[in-house]
Amino acid sequence: MSIKKVLSIVVLIGLMVGAKAQSFVNLVEEVNKGVVTIYVLEKKNPGQGDPYKKVSMEGMGSGSVVGQGGQYILTASHVVANATKIIVELYDGRKIGAKTFRASQIADVALLKLDSPATGITPVKIGDSDSVKVGEDVFVIGAPLGLTHSVSKGIISGKHRKENM
C-alpha cells in the first residue's frame, strides 16, 4: 500500500461507503471506539531566543487503532515528529505508552506501536481510497483544540490526480 493511499485513508477513516442502512449516529458510535487521543512530550525550540535551545512541551493529536491484535495506531506524522514520550488514551480511558514504528514526514503519516495491545478495542476498517467518488459523505473524528472525540462531517469535493502531483 502506498503512503499516498495510507494518507488518504487517514483522512477518510469514516467513509460511509455501503453504510446506507446504518444511521450516521450509529456509524459514528461504532468507529469512535477505535479512535484514540495521543499525548506527547516533545523537545522543541520555543521560537524565540537561542535557536539551538529546546524546551519540553506537551502536545496532542488523534489516531486510530488499526490491524489485528490492537497493537498499532495510525496518526499524522506531525503529531509525534518530535516526541520524546507518547501516551495513547483509548476510547474507554485506558492509557498505554507507544513508540513511533514507522513515519513519513512527506506524507504526514505515522504508525505507532503500543507498548501493550489495546485489548477489547475493535480496529477501524481501512477502506480503499481509490474507490471514493466526488459527492460521497465522509466524517472525521479527532481532537481539535483538545476537544477529544469531536466529529466533523463533510463531502468529498475533489480528488487528486496523479498527473497533478
Image (spheres, rainbow, N blue to C red):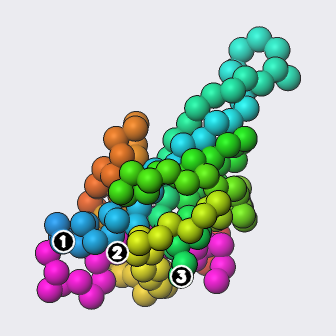
Q: Nearer the viewer, mark 1 or mark 2?
A: 1
Inspect the magenta stretch and tell me whether residue 3 lies in it: yes
**Residue at x 60% of width, y 64% of height:** 116
Give the residue pinned by disc 2: 15
Is 2 part of what is drawn in magenta?
yes
Say which quadrant the C terminus sits in. bottom right
Q: Quadrant of the N terminus?
A: bottom right
> Is 51 located above or below residue 145 in the figure?
above
* Contact between labelled residues 1 and 3, with CB atoms less than 8 Å apart: no
The quadrant holding residue 132 is bottom left
Front-most of 121 and 8?
121
> In the rendered structure, which segment of residues is drawn in magenta?
1-23
- State the image coordinates of residue 24 (x, y, percent, origin top left): 18, 70
**Residue farthest to the top, as pictured:** 49
Q: CA distance from mark 1 to mark 2?
A: 13 Å
Of the residues shown, which amino acid type is indicated by label 2? Leu
- Tell me the SS state at disc 2: loop
Give how far across and how far down residue 8 sits, in percent. 51, 71
Helix, strand or loop for disc 3: loop
The residue tagged 3 is 68
Specify which label sits upstream in the sequence, 1 or 2: 2
